[in-house]
Amino acid sequence: METIKGKSSSRPRVRPLEHFDKEIRVEFPRNLREENPIGTRFRADVKVSQKTKNGEPSGNPYLVATDSSIIKLEFKPSKSIKAIKLNTVSDRAYEYIEKEFKTDPSLIQFLDFREKAYQNSIIEPKKTDSTSSNTKRSHIIKTYALSRANGKCESCNDDAPFLKRNGQPYLEVHHIIELSNGGSDSPQNVAAICPNCHKRVTHGQDAEEFNNKLKNKITELEKELTE
């Protein structure tokens, strides 16, 4: 079984991964649910229970984990995006991704997320009606770039300079060809880079050359991920 984000509560819940329907309710120690990150897996003996009323079954059956049998498993999903909410600017982005995938964002596999990023690419962005001519951006593209970088600048390859308050690496998402100049909002046109590289690609004497190198690097990276 594993911990997931509760649908009707901010508290995490536990669901079975085999033998039972994943939607069945599981009684599981609260401290283990709340002290471990979403996606933590456990093995435990369970018993099927059901409440009764006047001697008759009442409500749906549920599982009760036997405390003494609970074992925390060492499990790290391969290329998974964990805590997508922590990699984004706002809760709105998190909610968008959750709605798009119809599942807990912390359980989304990297390659599935990459496929969705391409589906959500905007090749010819449309400008909004605001006076600042802001261009519509896809939250999923930005989140994909941050997840692809995995905490390292996609330009200089150094680790992110610091961790944000939520514990996530701080990187900035750069559009290689700016949206205002007709650049696409797509995986091939975004890079998650450190503030120093972002300043260089924007204000440096060699900004154009530096940006072209970054473009080639991201193009090659996306090709490798396709293979």
Image (cartoon, rainbow, N blue to C red):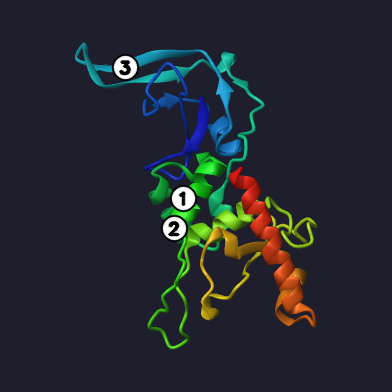
Which residue does the image show at 78% across and 80% down from the upper left? 204
The residue tagged 3 is 50
Residue nearest the viewer, comparing 118 with 171? 118
Determine whether label 3 and label 2 are within 8 Å by CB.
no
The answer to whether residue 132 shows anywhere in this view is yes
Q: Where is residue 32 in the image (x, y as percent from the top left)?
A: 58, 30
Q: Nearer the viewer, mark 1 or mark 3?
A: 1
The residue type indicated by label 1 comes to Lys
Q: In this view, does 194 lie to the left or right of 16?
A: right
Q: Position of residue 194 (x, y in %)?
A: 73, 65
The residue type indicated by label 3 comes to Gln
C-alpha span from label 3 to label 2: 44 Å
Q: Is residue 80 above or below residue 184?
A: above
Which residue does the image show at 47% across and 79% down from the upper left? 134
Mark 3 residue crowding within 10 angstroms, few (<14) / some (14–19) / many (20+): few
Residue nearest the viewer, comparing 76 with 197? 197
**Secondary structure at numbered mark 2:** loop
The residue type indicated by label 2 comes to Asn
Which residue does the image show at 46% across and 19% down from the upper left? 18
Mark 2 residue crowding within 10 angstroms, few (<14) / some (14–19) / many (20+): some
Q: In this view, does 217 lie above or below 47?
A: below
- In terms of sequence position, does the residue under pointer 3 or pointer 2 come before the other? 3
Which residue does the image show at 43% across and 49% down from the upper left? 98
Image disc number at residue 120 = 2
Determine whether label 1 and label 2 are within 8 Å by CB.
yes
The residue tagged 1 is 116
